Image (tube, rainbow, N blue to C red):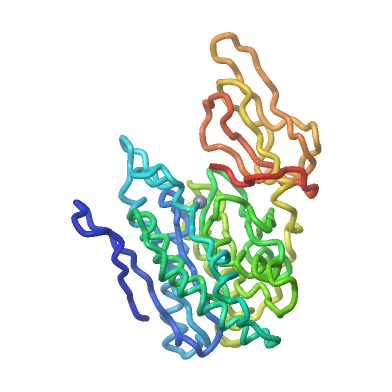
């Protein structure tokens, strides 16, 4: 294992941040995987999963079982990890700029449409190599204006040429679920089965430029731009994995999740075939559905929130999910699912204000447009 330090802070900073990455295997000898934990710094489960990953990867490397290259970033957001407001961790937004740490990544495709003009050919593998060179150069040219942008640039510089990118997050309270690109649905299915995901949410463009899309969407954007004249496969299997809820930090879950992620790396050829026991894949718990089919449930007024359905429940359109109770009048509003699907995420708060998102139901029918992710 090699350890690399990436300076994040600009000169004259009163605090100095650096990002640490752990490198296993040999670049260029096989597929490249990039895994990072807790980009939203207060989403802790991924950082515990990374501890198990590091331990196993050190052993696999010593045994010569890593065929490609694996980069593990066990704590992806040193800026966010240092943020707290009156005792409460605050890791989703950069306090300096107010910008979500998982938004506003550089989308390099627009630049590449110009720089690749006249350079692609009929050899898909050669196109992939060339596009990765141009993508890395485009990231290198990114001039960060803030520490948070410097952090995002460091992530992208390590991940944009990867074959596999796994971004480990969690929700407020949730069952395990996965976000990925629509063209990646088949390739992500084994990961969904291994982790026991109860929703897999697909989009071509979720809006807001999250990190997983910065690594993956350039491929189908370029393919569309060049109109199918050159073979351009979706060469980065990039995904955001939501490791349940923010309080679900346990050795049992983390060890199980790490085992699932490692098995997926073996399936994708990053690890040797005999690196791990090849048990049969578990049966998938869900089919992938469009992100445009996720219904956000919003609080219609302030009040005490009482859930009446469990997470992971299959619900019909019109089924009650929760009550919101005006604590003064006692008046109660029943919140119902507008769609048929799985109730996969909900709030960690039990008093809510008007307009707050108190739940999400994944349905098979796409009906939303515009920005599809919550703030
Ligand atoms: Zn997150």
Nearest the camera: 70 or 316? 70
**Rendered view: 126 above or below 16:** below
Residue that appears at 72% across and 48% down? 292
User: In which quadrant is the N terminus drawn?
Assistant: bottom left
Nearest the camera: 115 or 266? 115
Residue 287 drawn at (x, y percent): 76, 58
Furthest toward the top, the residue is 329
Residue 166 drawn at (x, y percent): 54, 66
Residue 23 in sight: yes
Residue 346 drawn at (x, y percent): 60, 39
* Figure disc tally: 0
Residue that appears at 30% across and 50% down? 82
Q: Quadrant of residue 277?
A: bottom right
Residue 262 drawn at (x, y percent): 55, 74
Taking 231 as reference, is 252 left or right? Answer: left
Q: Quadrant of residue 330?
A: top right
**Rendered view: 87 above or below 99:** above
Residue 166 in sight: no
Nearest the camera: 192 or 126? 126
Taking 343 as reference, is 355 left or right? Answer: left
Q: Quadrant of residue 294?
A: top right
């Amino acid at each position: 294992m090699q350890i690399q330090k990436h300076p994040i802070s600009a000169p004259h900073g009163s605090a100095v941040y650096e990002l640490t990455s752990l490198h296993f295997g040999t670049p260029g000898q096989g597929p490249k995987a990039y895994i990072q934990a807790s980009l939203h710094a207060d989403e802790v489960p991924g950082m515990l999963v990374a501890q198990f990953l590091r331990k196993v990867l050190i052993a696999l490397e010593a045994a010569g079982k890593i065929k490609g290259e694996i980069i593990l970033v066990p704590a992806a957001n040193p800026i966010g990890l240092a943020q707290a407001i009156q005792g409460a961790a605050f890791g989703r937004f950069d306090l300096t700029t107010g910008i979500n740490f998982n938004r506003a990544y550089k989308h390099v495709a627009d630049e590449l449409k110009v720089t690749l003009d006249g350079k692609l050919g009929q050899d898909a593998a050669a196109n992939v190599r060339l596009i990765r060179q141009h993508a890395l150069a485009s990231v290198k040219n990114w001039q960060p204006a803030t520490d948070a942008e410097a952090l995002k640039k460091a992530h992208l510089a390590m991940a944009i040429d990867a074959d596999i990118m796994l971004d480990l997050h969690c929700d407020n309270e949730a069952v395990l679920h996965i976000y990925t690109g629509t063209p990646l649905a088949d390739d992500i299915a084994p990961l969904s089965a291994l982790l026991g995901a109860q929703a897999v949410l697909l989009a071509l463009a979720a809006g807001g430029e999250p990190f997983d899309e910065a690594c993956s969407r350039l491929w189908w954007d370029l393919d569309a731009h060049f109109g199918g004249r050159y073979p351009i496969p979706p060469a980065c299997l990039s995904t955001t994995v939501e490791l349940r809820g923010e309080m679900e930090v346990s050795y049992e879950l983390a060890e199980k999740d790490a085992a699932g992620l490692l098995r997926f790396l073996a399936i994708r050829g990053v690890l040797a075939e005999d690196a791990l026991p090849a048990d049969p894949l578990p049966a998938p718990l869900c089919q992938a559905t469009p992100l445009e089919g996720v219904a956000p449930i919003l609080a219609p007024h302030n009040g005490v929130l009482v859930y009446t359905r469990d997470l992971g429940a299959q619900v019909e359109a019109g089924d009650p999910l929760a009550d919101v109770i005006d604590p003064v009048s006692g008046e109660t509003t029943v919140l119902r699912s507008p769609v048929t699907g799985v109730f996969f995420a909900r709030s960690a708060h039990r008093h809510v204000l008007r307009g707050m998102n108190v739940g999400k139901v994944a349905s098979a029918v796409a009906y939303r447009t515009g920005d599809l992710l919550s703030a």
